[in-house]
Image: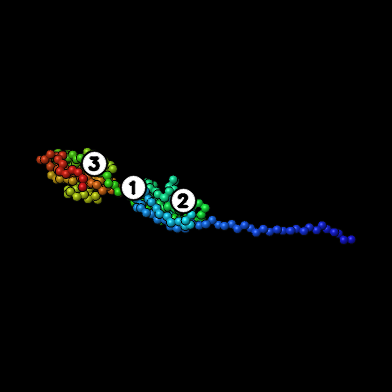
Amino acid sequence: VGIMGNEHIVKLVVSEAPVVEPDPTIEGSVYYTSSIVYDRPISISASVTPAEATPAYQWQRSTDSGSTWTNIDGATSGKYTPVAADMGDTVRIRVKVTAEGYLGEIVGAALKVSKAANNNYPEVIKLEAVKNGAGNYTGFKITNFDSDYEYVYSTTDTPNWSANQISSATVTGLTSNTTYYVFARFKETNTHTAGSIVSKNSIMLYDYVPLDRVLLEGYD
């Protein structure tokens, strides 16, 4: 006796998988159209294709000479003004360009920010002669000494900023019967170069003339 089994016919319908188009990729270049100086706006020019892509900007900072990068908060426009955090021998900045709906990115060159020039006027130096224990005039005091300034003195009217530097208001151990010239400019800082404008004054360490007599007063 044969045993009849149920027979099932299974029909498989295989649909073709939809084709997923990958996001398009942006290409192009970006370069800087202004100098890279502390506290001065940097502008850029970007060439992006396809033309319908809308560029988005992100400025970045590296503190290890460009090995790794982090985004600068709020720096998302085509211009950026360097701040104190962008200064230093191993610090670099750059701009990165992307576009929503597009793959890829366009990255600008890594740049070191230059210090800004300091063109401010230091105060005119005010001097008083100083006696030693024997009663001889062998020094002087800068009565308006400012720690933001760099001072040097000389027996000539030309400053040498690497010699005879003054670190405090009073200078002693000088030679009597000599005229000394004193010069001041703003110190170099992390963000600015040394001052370009020099204040100068001079004083005679002579017993037979008015000891606070100023020979020259003003700026170079």
Q: Tag 1, which secondary structure?
A: loop
Question: Seen in the image, is 213 located left or right of residue 161?
Answer: left
Q: Tag 2, which secondary structure?
A: strand
Specify whether residue 74 is in view. yes
Of tags 2 and 1, which is closer to the observer?
A: 2
Q: Which mark is residue 191?
A: 1
Mark 2 surroundings within 10 Å by alpha-carbon count, few (fewer than 14), some (14 through 19), many (20 or more): some
> Pointers 2 and 1 in contact (CB under 8 A)?
no
Please report whichever mark, 2 or 1, sits nearer to the chain's N-terminal start: 2
The quarter of the image holding the N terminus is bottom right
Q: Position of residue 119 (x, y in %)?
A: 27, 46
Which amino acid lies under the numbered mark 1 shown in the image of this protein?
A: Thr
Q: Which mark is residue 123?
A: 3
- Marks 2 and 1 sit apart, C-alpha to C-alpha, by 29 Å
Of tags 2 and 3, which is closer to the observer?
A: 2
Please report whichever mark, 2 or 3, sits nearer to the chain's N-terminal start: 2
